[in-house]
Amino acid sequence: MAPSAMSRWTGSLSDAQPVAYWLDDPGRPRPRPALTAAESCDLLVVGGGYSGLWTALLAKERDPRRDVVLVEAREAGWAASGRNGGFCAASLTHGPANGLTRWPDEFPRLHELGARNLDEFERAVDAHALDCDFERTGEITVATAPHQAAELRAVYEGMDRRGLADGLEFLDARAVREQVDSPTFLAGLHDRRGVALLDPARLAWGLKRACLRLGVRMYEHTPALTLRPYGAGMVVRTPYGSVRARSTALGTNVFPSLVRRVRPYTVPVYDYALMTEPLTADQLASVGWRRRQGLADSANRFHYFRLTAGNRVLWGGYDAVYPYGGRVRAEYDDRPRTYAKLAGHFFTCFPQLEGVRFTHAWGGAIDTCSRFAAFFGTAHRGRVAYAAGYTGLGVGATRFGANVMLDLLAGERTERTELEMVRRKPLPFPPEPFAWTGIALTKWSLARADTRGGRRNLWLRTMDRLGLGFDS
């Protein structure tokens, strides 16, 4: 990157605040008081992100008499649930290519369950008046290199052969640029119905309010410190109190699981995003984007981007940063060198928007697992259930995962619990220093593949055979 170009692009960041745009909202609800006593309940939910909030809400919907307590270490939605791009996808498998590779026989059922989950999600938005700017816009995955165009066409043809291409359309360069105009777009795969866009923080806050209306007892600034058997149930200790529960659902995702044997299955990956000032009518017209679809490019090191309800552009992705040792720390949430890189990529994609300024720049940790899609399980003789490893696609899939956890705690055989995806776990990550070395080599290999026509080297081919991967 030339010094003059660096100066021009980074100048757009001079006023950017290092806080998540979605959380920088005067409508942010006041936190609930911390737990300062000994409580007991039927179901304890640990974690106040999407995973925990959906679990508490659905538990009350299944049985309004069930006594549910939720504890959250900070405030509901403050971590990944309030920092993501707001893409709410039907896919439960991190996209069709990953699903077809890992669960070819089961994929039609997974595809159907994902579509049903998104429809039910939309109905819940209406039923609970979740004020989160929900828009069923769809998404276009764009190719910015010739080999990516061929890969997108192959995905479309694979879905079409299986009778699963309803709502999908392959777009050539002219067709994709008629939708959204960038000189970098060479093709696209348009999913017209399988993705919605929303305000992620306001979704979390809406779920919090809905839980409280249904009678969930919620304690914020209440980290769960230990989890142990207690009689016929479990007890969780917190700094100022404790909760005894017949069953416990863990929705802690990127944070270390209270079930220690689950910890090797996830690693934290730090992802970063920028938000522009609102586009003027002329600026928006220069890009097109009349249908407001979400977009993502299909490189290994990919970007995701979208319009907000106020016609700002969110631009994120590309760098996926794994901190040595898998530590989750607030200091990693801010990374100026990544912001500068993202700004340059933004204006390369949309040169007609040069002069637009960024108002917010932020990061956060994603829980990734080696198969890129959530895994599930139980512990302590079925009294504890967990779901984790959503790998950046948890906005919609956490609702499905919440239902899985409730099914497992009830000991029920359902169409969800019978899935191979639910019954089997991914391969765990190795201990350090092997995890850091392997992830660094994988990242280097993926970046190299992007510049070499998608050709995967021996390392990536070996990882593919083993079912291992790394993504954000």
Image (cartoon, helix red, strand yellow):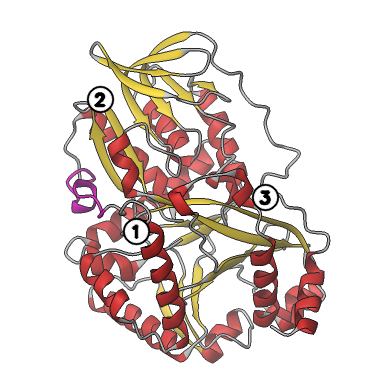
The range drawn in magenta is 416-427
Q: Is residue 194 above or below residue 239?
A: below
Q: Which mark is residue 20?
A: 3
Near-viewer residue (188 or 344): 344
Which quadrant, please, contains the N terminus? Answer: bottom right
Instruction: Provide the residue designation for mark 1.
Output: 434
Label the magenta part by its dominant secondary structure. Answer: loop
At mark 1, the secondary structure is helix
Q: CA distance from mark 2 to mark 3?
A: 36 Å
Q: CA distance from mark 2 to mark 1?
A: 33 Å
Does residue 343 appear in the picture of this structure?
yes
Q: Is residue 258 above or below residue 184?
A: above
**Identity, as a three-letter code, of the amino acid under mark 2:** Arg
Indicate which disc, 2 or 1, sits on the residue closer to the N terminus.
2
Q: CA distance from mark 3 to mark 1?
A: 32 Å
Pointer 3 and pointer 1: residues touching (CB < 8 Å)?
no
Name the spot of residue 465 as percent of width and height, x first. Answer: 21, 71
Name the spot of residue 234 as percent of width and height, x first. Answer: 31, 18
At mark 2, the secondary structure is loop
- Residue drawn 40% across the image and 76% down it: 445
Instruction: Provide the residue designation for mark 2.
Output: 383
Pointer 2 and pointer 3: residues touching (CB < 8 Å)?
no
- Residue drawn 77% across the image and 82% down it: 3
- Closest to the camera, between mark 2 and mark 1, is 1
Name the spot of residue 389 as percent of width and height, x first. Answer: 37, 50
- Residue 257 lies within the magenta run: no
At mark 3, the secondary structure is loop
